[in-house]
Image (spheres, grey):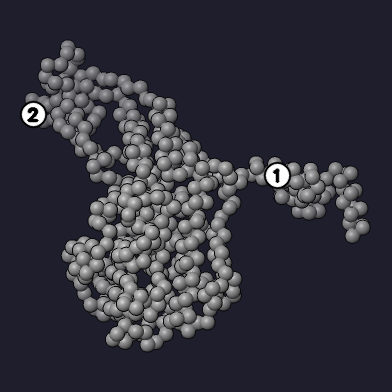
Amino acid sequence: MTIIDKLNALGYETVSEDYYSYIELWLQWYRGLVPNFHEYKVFNGLSRVKLQKLTAGMAKKAAENWADLLMNEKVHITLEGDAEQRFFDDFCVRNNFERMMNVYQEYCFALGTSAYVVRVSGLTVDGDGVAVSTAKNLTLDFVTADGVFPLSWKNGEIDECAFATVQAYDNHKYCYLQIHHRDESGSYLIENHLYDDTSGNMAEVELTSVAAFESVAPVFHTHSDQKLFVIDTPNIANNIDPDVPLGVSVYANGIDQLKLCDTVFNSVHSEIELGRKRIIVKPEAVRNMNGEAYFDPNDLVFYVLPEDSSNESTIHEVDAKLRIEEHTVAMQLALNMLAMKCGFGTNHWKFDAGHITTATQVISANSEEFRTLKKHEIILEEVLIELARIVLRLGNEFMGQHLDEDVEISVDFDDSIIEDDGTEFERDMRMMSSGILNPYEFRMKWMNEDEDTAKAALPPVQSLVLSERGADE
């Protein structure tokens, strides 16, 4: 049984299973193996040989690039309060937040959605699911798109949702299902279920039977109308099914371009692999008098001619010419087309000497990539601020903290990639010419000199001016 089957059995309706087939397709491209595309057969004159098309791995590369642009080590979440900042920073450290957010931002762009669910750990509840003690800490669950099951939503915002994560303990694989829904009063109630999926049969087991879940209550009443989860998606309209509140992969509309990339990339490999001299063999030279084959039938170097072939010699060779330049042009074209589909604009990737690299590490402020980056930052900023507020609220409600839940929260993204050195150099030159920037400050910045060295290197007139300024001061 699937998670959707389990939810239906519990009385919940979610998104159609058809939509999750798209997520599975995006996951296959992310992994680099789509069976009905990458697996194929080639006829060698005697039989069809099974082959696997090589992948350039561009689906992962696209998601990885967006994750690195959006959620890297230079992103800072600032809370305007010392106690609030310390509490949130401690939460981040304990949950490996910096690393995991980059990873799940990549999953978000690959599969269309990620979810971040805050759980109260070490909390004692009574038989009605009401907390009767303070919690030990807060745990952050990271959930990929295939584990997010919306139960109710409005205007694209998910209000109630179920989350499934796979975890392993004591040589068993478990599926942990937590269902966040509202009770009659409008407060959130969380149901927890655990399934043993070691054999693939999804048999439900008691939470107390697994050490890692023995303190997890089957039902928990939050007595709050505020959500304990945040949904993250790329800022891309869902054209697969506009009525579904889940996001779409950054390459959802670039599947054809992914196919072209892999087709060309595989052809480059085949061109080199098969560029050696081919051995053309007539049927009479295939086997010896005992019926034993002279060559491996799976070796594509050999090609057996039909019985009624021409008067060619029994065995002859064909010297193929490598089309490296043509393949390079074709691969660059495929990469440019995919980059446009993924919001990077053109020339984001470069194919050189058989390697695919990011063509530039900077983004022009008027480029398509810059505008798309800023668009994605809108959602990510909302996600990070909402997550921080959830942490503060739960700290007050269940950990005895006295935090300001309305504290000012800001997110500083990495802008170092926006402007290249050449642009900044020209700007500083203009500032120096207009007197805003001192010449020695310019040298200190661009020539990596200390203040004394920079001043000493100035022309005599400028050095005299600086000396007179120093005397006046």
Residue with the mark numbered 1: 427
Residue 24, percent across and down?
28, 52
Please indicate, yes or no, whether residue 306 appears anywhere in the rendered image. yes
The answer to the question of whether label 1 and label 2 lie on touching residues, with beta carbons closer than 8 A, is no
Direction top: furthest residue: 311
Disc 1 versus disc 2: nearer the observer: 1
Please state the horizontal and vertical placement of residue 358, each as a whole percent of the image: 49, 42
Asked which secondary structure carries label 1, the reply is helix
* Of 164 and 152, the residue lying toward us: 152
Q: Residues within 10 Å of mark 1 (few under 14, many from 20)?
A: few
Residue 99 drawn at (x, y percent): 46, 61
Which element is circle 2 on?
A: loop
| Relative height, residue 256 to residue 7 (above, below) | above
Residue 291, labelled with which disc? 2
Is residue 214 positioned above or below 113 on the image? below
Q: Position of residue 181 (x, y in %)?
A: 32, 71
Q: Residue furthest left?
A: 290
Residue type highlighted by circle 1: Arg
Residue placed at 19% from the left, 30% from the top? 43
Q: How many marks?
A: 2
* Mark 2 crowd level (few <14, some 14–19, many ≥20, 10 Å Cα): few
**What residue is shown at x 54% (from left), y 77% (from top)?**
404
Q: CA distance from mark 1 to mark 2?
A: 80 Å
Where 79 falls versus 306 (above or below)?
A: below
- Disc 2 residue type (three-letter): Gly
**368 and 294: which one is in front?**
368
Q: Earlier in the sequence, mark 1 or mark 2?
A: 2
**Is 140 on the left-hand or right-hand side of 291?**
right
Query: Which image quarter is the C terminus in?
Result: bottom right
